Amino acid sequence: MKHSKPISRRTRRTISRDLTLGLTLMTALVFSVFGAVYQVYYIDREARNLESEAADVADEFAEVLARPLWNLDVDTVRQIAKAYLSSDFLSAVRIETNLEAYFDNMPESPQMERWLYLKRNIASGDEHIGTTELLFSRERIQAIQKRSLISILATIVLVTLVIGLGTHLLMKRMVAKPLDRLIAGIRTIAAGDYQLALPLEKHSDINTIISEINIMAREIDRRETDLKKLRETLKNIVDSMPSVLVGVDPEGRVTQWNREAQKHSGIDADRALGCHVGEVYPFLAEAMGWVKQAIAEKRPFKESKVTSRAKGDVRYADITVYPLDASSTGGAVIRVDDVTERVRIEEMMVQSEKMLSVGGLAAGMAHEINNPLAGIMQNIQVMQNRFSSDLPKNHEVAERCGVTMSAIQAYMQGRSISQMMAMIMESGKRAAKIVENMLSFSRKSEAVTTSCDLAQLLDATVELAENDYDLKKKYDFRKIEIVREYDSRVPKVSCEASKIQQVFLNILSNGAQAMAENPTQAAPHLVLRVKMDDGQACVEIEDNGPGMDATVRKRIFEPFFTTKSVGVGTGLGLSVSYFIITENHGGTMTVSSTPGAGTRFVIHLPLEKMANESLTAESLRPTTN
């Protein structure tokens, strides 16, 4: 079980800290509000007192100026103005009559927020004689406001500190320490000690929490045990499946890796979990597109017979993607089933069915063709005899007709009739050979079998192929590199040597022609193997030619199917070879090939009874000659 690291006390938030901070802030806020209200009230009261005092001074100033202004005593007016201006309260005065201004120290554009402006009429009795304008300073209000603000802030800070410190000490004693003990117990339980019983505290509310935690620990212990059993069961089920099962999240990271996946990829589950599936199992790199499609469509996706190469062998696999419920973890499960043997069995069954159906047809066709073909060849032989100069009867008939056999032969030579007859005879022999091959579909040879060394028989076939291709001058078989991998411990096989040699020759010639027809082929070579495989003798003939696609490979053993140009081949060589191995010798014959990667024919033949019984169970390692 994985546990998170304990949070540092310096960085973690605690109930004690939050309560202390909250109460402190609330206290500061309350005192701030009351202070602000008091400040506004106090400043407003002082402002009204200032305005009342300024109004009294203005009224008094206007009354004092009435007499000297009536007498036009300018000096007295100015002295009175200066006397009033000597105080810090009155800052500027303007005195004027209808005739002139007697005194004026008013600023041109005063900032009214700094001053209190008042205007009074000057009268003597009931007669208006002039006006006066006064500017009173508000600095006293600002000084009072500043002193009041400092006093309020000092009070707020002091009260907040006292309440905060007291709350902190109280929370630490009543909350923090019990919680620390509770947390220590919870961490012990989280570490896996579900049998621990947390001790009770003094306060009933905390004891309620402790009791519930103890009950929860017992329940977790029970569920953890059940969950562990379930996990082990599920893991055994998943690992026991013969298919590769890989769980991935929507981003392609591995979440599940069973034993078969480990076996095929060679990577342990601990290393694979969390990695991208394409990195740990390159064969499934393309499957991420299918995973996204399956998740988007919310239905399984299946791709059949996906090919891969393992140790030079073509393998087939069915890949199925099952999307997981997006409400849980999401992602998908990829299932890979190796169907190589099934595909090969299916192909062999299809091939066998084709061969069986064609066998009966070939027998009937062969008999139907054989009768007129025999007549043609017999008549050609008779015609050749009738034109021969060795028979007296020919000379007698020629003289009766007024000609000589020499003249007839000269005419035939001049018109190439003899060559035409020879060509007809050669074509007839070729057709007879085809008929003979077709008849091999429907009947087994009754020839006597002998014990043969497959390696020697294969070498003899190579020598025969070298001479044959050298004579035809189409390509030199001797320039093909031959790599022999013979296991000397393979016992002899009971077989018809001539027919097995015919099979080898057909495969060798097809491989040589395929490599010769590939202009880009560099250093053509054939690999010949003789070994033991599953209790049978196995012969492998592998070339590095252009290979075959799936369509050609599936039809390669069909009668009359050929990839050669018209007139070059009959399409019966490999089909006859297939019947020789499967029908006449009870073996198997398969082919594996991919475009650009060469072709490999694999022949399995049962051993002789005595050799088979004496064969030891030890593994046989091939040696290269």
Image: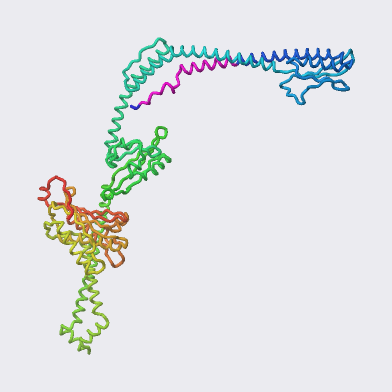
Image quadrant for the C terminus?
A: bottom left
Q: Quadrant of residue 448?
A: bottom left
Give 363 or 165, whichever is nearer the viewer: 165
Q: Position of residue 335 (x, y in %)?
A: 33, 41
Coloring basis for residues: rainbow
* 193 displayed left or right of 67: left
Question: Which segment is the magenta one?
Answer: 3-32
Q: Position of residue 439 (x, y in %)?
A: 21, 62
Q: Quadrant of residue 106?
A: top right
Image quadrant for the N terminus?
A: top left
Instruction: Please identify the residue farthest to the bottom as the structure is shown.
Output: 402
Residue 586 part of the magenta segment = no
* 374 displayed left or right of 243: left
Q: Position of residue 200 (x, y in %)?
A: 37, 12
Which residue is at a point 28% across and 46% down the rendered structure image?
339
Q: Position of residue 370 (x, y in %)?
A: 22, 68
Q: Residue 9, relative to residue 509: is it above or below?
A: above
Residue 28 part of the magenta segment = yes
Give 75 or 514, whichever is nearer the viewer: 75
Badge count: 0
Q: Residue 15, relative to residue 573: is it above or below?
A: above
Q: Residue 323, relative to residue 358: is it above or below?
A: above
Give 52 or 305, whichever is nearer the viewer: 52
Q: Quadrant of residue 197?
A: top left
